[in-house]
Image (cartoon, grey):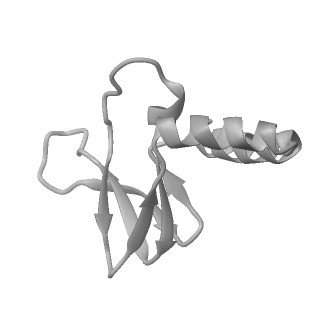
Amino acid sequence: MYIVLTGKIELRTAPPDGGYKPNTIGTLIGGDSLGEEGIYKVGPVLRKDSAYAEEDSYLMELSKEILVKAKETMEVEGLGMDWFTLNNNIKRQYL
C-alpha cells in the first residue's frame, strides 16, 4: 500500500478495445492512497491498473508487516481505538 505524500498520481487502465491510449480512471493527490488490496487480500494480487506520476511526487510505502507491527504496538500502548480508526480508513479506500 502507498500513501501519496505530495504530488499528483494518475491511475490508468488498459483500453477496453485493445487500442493504445489508456483510460484515466482517477487522479490521486497528497493524502490519498493506492494498493490497499495488497494489505487485505491473501495470496498474490493481480494488478489491474497502473499508476503514473504526473509531476514530482513522494509516496510512503506501508507493507502488511508494518501494519501488523503498528497494530500490535498500538494495542500494547492502549491505543486500540486509534488502530480501529486507522484500519477503517484504509479499508474505506479499498472498498
Whether 23 is drawn above or below 88: the answer is below
Whether 40 is drawn above or below 4: the answer is above
Residue 45 image-quadrant placement = top left
Measuring from the top left, give residue 34's x and y in whole percent.
47, 51
Foreground residue among 22 and 92: 92
Residue at image coords 32%, 54%: 12
Res. 13 visible in picture: yes
Foreground residue among 87 and 45: 87
Foreground residue among 5 and 19: 5
Residue at image coords 37%, 76%: 57
Measuring from the top left, give residue 83's x and y in whole percent.
77, 42
Res. 94 visible in picture: no
Residue at image coords 40%, 73%: 58
- In this view, which residue lies farthest toward the bottom? 56
Q: Is residue 72 left or right of residue 28?
A: right
Foreground residue among 7 and 63: 63
- In this view, which residue lies farthest toward the top? 43
Q: Is residue 91 left or right of residue 43?
A: right
Measuring from the top left, give residue 75's x and y in whole percent.
79, 37
Total numbered circles: 0
Measuring from the top left, give residue 72's x and y in whole percent.
69, 35
The quadrant of the picture occupied by the C terminus is: top right
Residue 77 image-quadrant placement = top right
